[in-house]
Image (cartoon, rainbow, N blue to C red):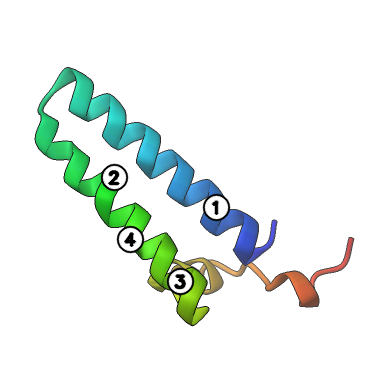
C-alpha cells in the first residue's frame, strides 16, 4: 500500500466513523467530518498533509517509489 492510498483509506474510515458517531451519539461529531474534509482540501492544494507523515513513519512508500 502506498502513502496516497493509505491516506484516502484513513480519511474515509475517519469520516465514516464520525458520521456513525454523529448519528448515534451526538451531532457534535460532525465537526470531525468537517475537519477531515478541510484537511483533504488543504492537502490537495499544498500537497502536504500530517497524515502522510504519519503513514511514512509506519513505513509506507510514495506511489512513485513503490514496485508493483
Mark 3 highlights which residue?
43
Estimate the spatial distance between the alpha carbons at disc 4 and disc 2, rounded to whole Å.
9 Å
Mark 2 near mark 3, Cβ–Cβ under 8 Å? no
Q: Earlier in the sequence, mark 3 or mark 4?
A: 4
Mark 4 highlights which residue?
38
Q: Earlier in the sequence, mark 4 or mark 2?
A: 2
Residue lying at 29% horizontally and 25% vertically, measured from the top left:
20
Instruction: Work out whether 8 lies above or below 20.
Output: below
Q: Nearer the viewer, residue 32 or 6?
A: 32
Q: Residues within 10 Å of mark 1 (few under 14, many from 20)?
A: few
Q: Earlier in the sequence, mark 2 or mark 3?
A: 2
Mark 1 highlights which residue?
8
Estimate the spatial distance between the alpha carbons at disc 2 and disc 3, rounded to whole Å.
15 Å
- Mark 3: secondary structure: helix
Where is residue 14 drawn, in percent x and y? 37, 43
Residue lying at 21% horizontally and 21% vertically, measured from the top left:
23
Where is residue 43 drawn, in percent x and y? 45, 71
Estimate the spatial distance between the alpha carbons at disc 3 and disc 4, rounded to whole Å.
9 Å
Mark 2 highlights which residue?
33
Where is residue 60 drawn, in percent x and y? 63, 67
Amino acid at each position: 500500500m502506498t502513502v496516497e492510498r493509505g491516506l484516502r483509506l484513513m480519511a474515509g474510515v475517519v469520516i465514516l466513523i464520525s458520521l456513525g458517531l454523529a448519528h448515534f451519539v451526538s451531532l457534535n461529531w460532525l465537526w470531525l467530518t468537517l475537519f477531515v474534509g478541510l484537511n483533504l482540501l488543504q492537502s490537495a492544494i499544498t500537497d502536504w498533509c500530517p497524515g502522510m507523515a504519519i503513514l511514512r513513519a509506519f513505513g509506507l512508500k510514495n506511489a512513485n517509489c513503490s514496485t508493483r
